Amino acid sequence: MGDGLNRATLLGNLGADPELRFTQGGQPVLSLRMATQESYLDKNKERKERTDWHNVVIWGKRGEALAKFLRKGAMVYVEGSIRTSSYDDREGNKRYKTEIVASDLIPCGERRKGGGAPASGDRPAGAPRNAPPSGGAAEPPEGDHDYPTEGGDDIPF
């Protein structure tokens, strides 16, 4: 059997300012908290919105450069792969962490105050042709929480 395919493509807004760290070997790694939204009709034909939160990491000089200007609320287009790793917490329980390891990130503009649509339909330079212009963003809840999964009515904001 041939190679598999592990590809993630996201378009959403940063829920917090990015965090730049360095490994013990001096390698830069930028961590982002990103929200994506989709709307759907529930069983009562009412429009609902679902927000999913993603952890994204960008390694190397690209991450270091992006750390200088990306801020909370910025709309970004991310391409990369999904990675899951495990670790043991302080109590010895096995925990899992899933993140998107970005191979490409394109800033697509800032969130508009009031969540309104952008003034023009122009896309920022370098944005993919099929990426929509920037728009509103979801705010993440304060603190470190487990977020509702599919079917949950308690959206955290």
Image (cartoon, rainbow, N blue to C red):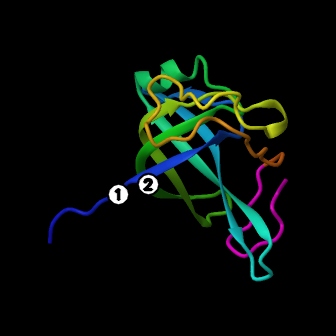
Q: Position of residue 50 (x, y in %)?
A: 71, 62
**Is residue 31 magenta-colored?**
no
Using a 10 Å C-alpha cutoff, classify the residue at mark 1 as few (fewer than 14 neighbours), some (14 to 19) or many (20 or more). few
Of labels 2 and 1, earlier in sequence is: 1
Q: What span is colored magenta in the figure?
A: 144-157
Residue type at numbered disc 1? Asn
Q: Residue at the spot x=79%, y=44% of the render?
A: 139
Q: Secondary structure beneath disc 2?
A: strand
Q: Which mark is residue 6?
A: 1
Q: Position of residue 6 (x, y in %)?
A: 35, 57
Which quadrant of the view contains residue 37? bottom right
Contact, mark 2 vs mark 1 (Cβ under 8 Å): yes
Residue at the disc numbered 2: 82
Q: Residue at the spot x=60%, y=38% of the render?
A: 32
Q: Position of residue 105 (x, y in %)?
A: 47, 34
Observer-nearest residue: 120 or 114? 120
Which quadrant of the view contains residue 49? bottom right
Q: Position of residue 8 (x, y in %)?
A: 44, 53
